Image (tube, grey):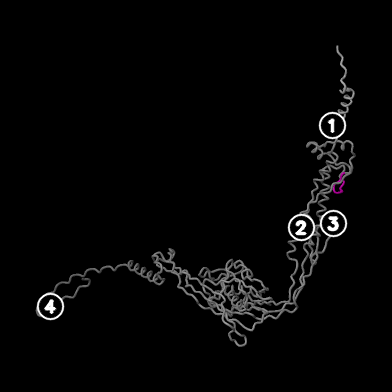
Amino acid sequence: MKYYRPVRGHRVVNKKRIAIFGVAVAVAVVAIIFCVYMFSEVKLTDEKEQELFTTGTFLEGVSVDGIDLGGLTYAQGEEKVKASVDSMLSDNKIEYTVQETAYSYSLPDAGLSVDYETPLREAMLYGREGTRWDLQFKKTEPKDWPLDYVFDETALDRLIDTDSANWGEDAVDASYAVDKQKNEDDLTTGGTLVMQEAKDGWKVNVDGIKATAKNQIEAKLFTPFAAEIEVVKAKGSDSPKEMIKMGSYTTNIGSSSSKGRKFNIWMISDKLNGAVFKPGEVFSVNDYVGDRTEELGWALAPGIENGTYTDQAGGGICQVSSTFYNAALRAQMDIVARLPHTIMAGYVPPGMDATISTGGPDFKVKNPYDDDMVMIVTCNIPDMKVTVDIYGTVERDYYLKFESELINKQDAPAVKYKTNDALGKYEVKRTKVGQGEEKYQIWGQKYDKDTDEKIGDKFEVTTSTYRGIAPEVELGSGIPLPAEGTSIEDVQAQAKELERKEAEANAPQPEPSPSAEPTPSVAPEPTPPVTPEQPVEGAA
């Protein structure tokens, strides 16, 4: 057997050291496993959790929002906490006053709700879940869980915004207004110009109310408070400029006007009476008066529609808008929107009318001056007149007149015929009158107030065109549709002739008379001459 010496420089393995190292590693592994185990989370199974919430009790020292729950079951604790929450929500309110008017909102209506179930659950599980180390060695300390308050600010904002709609009062500057008088029985309306004294207004700090209410909800401290009121000072002087009549116009109501038309003229006159035009403001008759419907009290009366007259709610009101138009021209207001009728109106000169219709044409004017303008509409149905007076503060040394000039005229388009089987066989019925096209130039002229002399040349105001409208005629089934360009008179003559011929053809024929009995011959006398026999009735 050979023996070898260790080679110089080679390390000799120490088995004792290896053993010690192995033990240390094992101990470390065990320690790590122990730590992992002891500091791992313990979570109840669904079954154990259900059992705890059904039969278990809260640990001593456990509370929710300061309410002691120690020793209580979950159901007992929930009942106790819920009663406290309900009491807090019902006993407290957001309360404030605005100009001595009280307002009050319940907390739920103001958007406050409380989640007590989440903290209750966490309180019940306290000391039952966590790390094994804490559950084994750590003493369970008393603990309180706060309630979870949920605040929807938009709900509170909606309540305050709804109530604030009627808060405040605008400042009233010293100005003029119309002291209106009306009598619906007599269908009269009018008024006088009166001066209003300046009056301060007030407004509410709505944002301040919202901020205070939100702070109270967040702090859970509720105390009634008064809203902050801000005074709105009236502007301008206490004595407004004197108002003078700047434009006026009167139209006559036709004697043949229906009861409904007269009522509508009175009604729109009353609505427009007292209108105030602010500087730079565009005034719309349709917006100011509102829709014209039977439900809103307007009467049915003839009105112009598509070139003919039809019964419509508010029929006849264009006489007032046209009167307003002529007064506005004389007051030199800016005409923003205006259209003539499709058919010329008889109550103003040609080209000087202004039509309006619900959802359709509108009449709009603008106050071009620095001060208010006021309108008085005087309607007197017994006298059959409507007058519009417009007042302003601008003194002028002239007045205005207007005239219309026919500058183009064309014949009416050809008649449109169609058959209507519902008519009599030879009946001719005109359903649309029709008209030729006419275009008018409106001229204005200034006149000196003192001398009535013309000032300068006349000036163009606007043009009005009444488009040609084809007459429309319906024919009975016995009349053939005529060729284009045939006049209504010719068609009527043709209808009469056709009806006459049919009547003749259908007339009964006279029955023939029976033949006469033969007359016996008489021998002639020899002496007198023989005379010829008279023809017999019915002979050829």
Q: Which mark is residue 530?
A: 4
What's the distance in space between the residues labelled 1 and 4, CA to CA?
176 Å
* Tag in front: 2 or 1: 1
Q: Is disc 3 placed on a helix, strand or loop?
A: loop
Residue type (three-letter) at the residue carrying disc 2:
Leu
Name the N-terminal-most of marks 3 and 4. Answer: 3
Q: Is disc 2 placed on a helix, strand or loop?
A: helix
Q: Are marks 2 and 3 in contact (CB under 8 Å)?
A: no
* Tag in front: 3 or 4: 3
What's the distance in space between the residues labelled 4 and 2, CA to CA?
136 Å
* Tag in front: 1 or 3: 1
Name the N-terminal-most of marks 1 and 3. Answer: 1
Residue type (three-letter) at the residue carrying disc 3:
Leu
The residue under label 1 is 33
Q: Is residue 226 left or right of residue 357?
A: right
Quadrant, the N terminus: top right
- In the image, the segment drawn in magenta is 62-68
The residue under label 3 is 221
| Image location (x, y in percent) of residue 67 | 86, 48
Q: Is residue 132 left or right of residue 153?
A: right
| Image location (x, y in percent) of residue 166 | 73, 66
The answer to whether residue 255 is seen in the rendering is: no
Q: Is residue 464 above or below residue 71?
A: below
Residue type (three-letter) at the residue carrying disc 4:
Val
Q: Is disc 1 placed on a helix, strand or loop?
A: helix
Q: What residue lies at 14% left-to-right and 72% top-to-bottom?
A: 521
Q: Are marks 3 and 4 in contact (CB under 8 Å)?
A: no
The residue under label 2 is 156
* Tag in front: 1 or 4: 1
